[in-house]
Amino acid sequence: MDRNLLDPRSWNVRARSAAAAALVVTICLVLAGGALLMVLYRTLEHSARDAADTRARQIVEELRTAAPGGLDSSLFATDGQIGTIQVIDSAGIVVAASPGADRLPVTFEPVPPGDSRYLGNIDLGGEPDYWIVEQGAQSPSGPATVVVGADREPIEGILGTVALLMAIGGPVVVALVAVASYRLVGAALLPVERIRARVAAISTDRLDERVPVPDTQDEIARLAETMNSMLGRLESGHRAQQRFVSDASHELRSPLATITAALELAHTRPELVDTSLVDESLLPEARRMNHLLADLLLLARADENGLTHTSVDVDIDDLMYAESARVRDMSPELVVRAAIAPVRVVGDPQQLARVVRNLVDNARRHARREIRLICRTSSDGAVLEVADDGPGIALLDRQRIFERFVRLDTPRTRDSGGAGLGLAIVAEIVATHGGTIDVTDSDTGGARFVITLPVDGTCQSSPDFSR
């Protein structure tokens, strides 16, 4: 026999449930049966003792007017409760007794008239045991002791019969409970088995399938709903991963094609390789590919473990001033309006600088004539605003732009747009720092990005448009 079969941990849920139900019912039956037998025994004992007391009192009353030999014979009749009766005089001689009673006195200690004594269980030697009750009496012939014994044999027979019935019926009840539990648990787990079978059949190319949801509105129905929700997330993640790989391949293909063409030209016509080819083709494409790979690695780290960052004091106003100066140098045709108040937060200076730069580059790419930079504090924390007067962002696209490789500009050229990762990186960094980002319409008709970050040790003053 396999020893694992004796280990409950190797059983299935149905077997463990049936065994647990059988064990609980067995314990309950044993405890209830023991309590029942004890109560039944005590009840029958008290009933027999009350019958013995009643018979003894009747004989004592009769002895007040009649000698023991002249008592009515019906007082000495035995039945299912009364087993033996003796009347013992003061000398210890049995002067009257029930038919078949022992002629030897049960006790040699006379009881004074008016008193009574309960001797409990007395073994008369080979005969049935009795519960003995004694009462003192005063007869015309002198004091006497009335001894009445309640027979234990019928009571023990009743207890034995009840115990036998319980011994026979108990295992039958336990077996029925075990079988019923096994079948009921099996029926209850049938929807779970269907869910398991359906999930086992779902592969990566069939993530659009869902498990059946029972109409029971119970835990199994909630399990099915949770499984369907999980499958939905897996499907969305799988599609996003496929789209991510496809877009990354597309974005890398262009710089790789340019670099490959330049290298092939250098291999076949080395005399054409000059500084212009390197500066205009090789280096820009290499930098573009390096920047794209850095963005992809950052997002991959965010997906795997979340972005980690240092926690130091960062002056957001300094980052905003630096970006406003950079835009003025790079795009002198744009008007940069900066309303910057001193604001300090706790975070990673490099990541927060990247947030500001990505938002400013996005605004610079779409602005027509003006960019607005605002830095201030509010009751919610530090607020950073970057707005432009470009075409703006449609309401339906304001959440989609934070997804990876999403670009609302259709031409995929180097001048009109990036790889579509800048805003996704901004959203990851802001979330890592416990902040929020929102997109609204700017006063000039373009897009307005608003970032709110938790503030620690901030200082606030009136916005300064002079710098």
Image (tube, grey):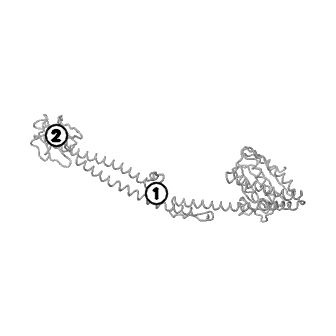
For the residues labelled 1 and 2, say whether their Cβ atoms are less than 8 Å apart. Answer: no
Q: Is residue 76 above or below residue 413?
A: above
Q: Is residue 80 above or below residue 395?
A: above
Q: Of 139 and 363, which appears nearest the observer?
A: 363
Left or right? Give the position of 425 relative to 31. right
Image coordinates of residue 209 in percent, x first then y, are 59, 65
Displayed quadrant of residue 249: bottom right
User: As shown in the figure, which amino acid type bears the numbered disc 2?
Assistant: Val
Left or right? Give the position of 166 relative to 305. left
Q: Which residue is mark 1?
A: 14
Dot 2, how many residues are within 10 Å of its Cα: few (below 14), some (14-19), or many (20+)? Answer: many
Dot 1, how many residues are within 10 Å of its Cα: few (below 14), some (14-19), or many (20+)? Answer: some
Residue under the point 38% across and 58% down: 176
Residue under the point 65% across and 61% down: 238
User: As shown in the figure, which amino acid type bears the numbered disc 1?
Assistant: Arg
Image coordinates of residue 339 in percent, x first then y, are 80, 51
Q: Of 265 and 8, which appears nearest the observer?
A: 265
Residue under the point 44% across and 60% down: 184
Q: Which mark is residue 166?
A: none
Q: Earlier in the sequence, mark 1 or mark 2?
A: 1
Image coordinates of residue 393 in percent, x first then y, are 75, 62
Tag 1, which secondary structure? helix
Left or right? Give the position of 464 relative to 206. right
Q: Of 190 and 283, which appears nearest the observer?
A: 283
What is the C-alpha distance between the residues marked 1 and 2? 65 Å
Disc number lying in front (1 or 2): 1
Q: Which residue is mark 2?
A: 146
Tag 2, which secondary structure? strand
Displayed quadrant of residue 199: bottom right
Left or right? Give the position of 286 relative to 457. right
Q: Of 254 and 44, which appears nearest the observer?
A: 254
Image coordinates of residue 430 in percent, x first then y, are 71, 52
